[in-house]
Image (cartoon, rainbow, N blue to C red):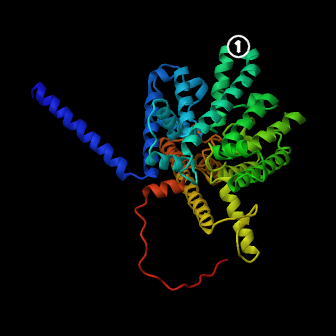
Amino acid sequence: MNRNENRMHSRSLFTMLVAIVNRLKTRTSPPQLILMIFFCLIWVGALLLMLPYSSSSGQSIGLLNALFTATSAICVNGLVVVDTGSVFSTFGQIVIMILIQVGGLGFMTVGVMVAIMIGKRIGLRQRLIIQQATHSTSSQGLVKLSIYMVLIAFAFEALATLVLTLRWQADMGWGQAAYYALFHSISAFNNAGFALWSDSLSPFVGDPVVNITVILLFIIGGLGYIVVVDVFRKRSWRKLSLHAKVVLFGSGILFAVGFCLIYLLESWNPATFGSLSAGERIWAALFQGATPRSSGFNTIDIGSMLAASQFLIIILMFIGAASGGTGGGIKVNTVFVLVLATINTFRGGGQIHAFERKIAFETVMRALSVVISSLAVVLLVSLLLTISEGMLEEHFLEVLFEATSAFSTTGLSMGLTSDLSPLGKIIVTITMYAGRLGPLTLAFALAQKKRSSKIGYPEDHILIG
């Protein structure tokens, strides 16, 4: 084959590739495109982390470990099979940092900023993808929201980096303190839970500066950009949207319940609170009461906590943060809606409302779908891990904890993750991916076009309860 034929062949392949890409753009729905791009980002991260240059030893950590870490980072989970601080080189840690930032902000938000900088117009299809990724109820003002998201993230991360640098500079010098501060600020705000210490933030269990800074970061990130922007703009409880009120009210209740119960339960546990002073116990309870909301950091050993505390954390992890935030779980607003619907049913039915606003029946059904599908995934993953890891019945709580942590993208662990078999790593990797994108997003992405039934069936009754 001569040079001209080679050129013609290359052009034909290029033309075919462009045609395939254009066909995917027109045929692929926004949820399906989100799945595909996240999938591609994970593999790009895995290939970078698999490089010998990403390892502190100069030897590759292997494809499976790199894939697991990349998935955990881009899905802002925090579960690790190798120690981040000791196994990865500075280059590898920076790759993880970038993956966390892109995963937390959302690839479309990053894409919007790049498009704005190069002067490219944001089309309707791009706006629909942004709407799907940010859980917005309207396609209007999404470009402005994306800009706000980036500014909010960078502002909080920069401020936290400055505070933590000043706190740590006496212990490790300005350069290392600034690097550690930046890494943990990005990890905390995006609810990732990656830490450069093997025992997470346990060395700072009673440190007010570290506790307050990190807690504020992952709580604000978990509330969601829509809520933060709404609070910043309106600055009045009465003027806030119903979504913002529900998220703030529900998050406050969960934070208070988590703190009180963990403080009461672990005060009887010498393995966790036994060696802590009264002040350190309060800080530890505050941190562990908030971190299951999808943060992934810990200041006391999770595996040493009482079974009652561990089960409480499972419940809090399953609930997670708020829709549109950097956290995971079924979302606090989802639980709030179902609680209201349940109370309303006990009272005899009628209109479901909150804060003088009616809640649509479709919202209740959507919330119910999220809970049922999420619960099904967690139970299925628990069953698969019990089989793959050969766990005995006395270790079932550990399996359920790990499955919930993976699906809710929390990243807390009782110790099972580091000992996972190759099959177990694959199961947890898929679980983190599904948990980050959400059951409904997966369902919408895989579903065919809506089919409207042409047959009207008579109504009948089914006994409930």
The quadrant of the picture occupied by the N terminus is: top left
Residue 361: x and y, percent? 62, 69
| Residue 142 sits above or below residue 361 on the image | above
Secondary structure found at label 1: loop
- Name the amino acid type tagged 1: Gly
Q: Is residue 274 visible?
A: no
Please name whichever residue, 128 or 45, is drawn nearer the observer in this view of the structure: 128
Please name whichever residue, 104 or 146, is drawn nearer the observer in this view of the structure: 146
Which residue occupies 77% across, 75% down? Answer: 347
Would you call the spot at circle 1 few (<14 residues within 10 Å), some (14-19), or many (20 or more)?
Answer: few
| Residue 420 sits above or below residue 368 on the image | above
Residue 157: x and y, percent? 66, 30
Q: Is residue 82 left or right of residue 345?
A: left
Please name whichever residue, 383 or 255, is drawn nearer the observer in this view of the structure: 255
Would you name the residue on which mark 1 appears?
173
Which residue occupies 9% across, 26% down? Answer: 2
Which residue occupies 49% across, 30% down? Answer: 117
Q: Is residue 5 visible?
A: yes
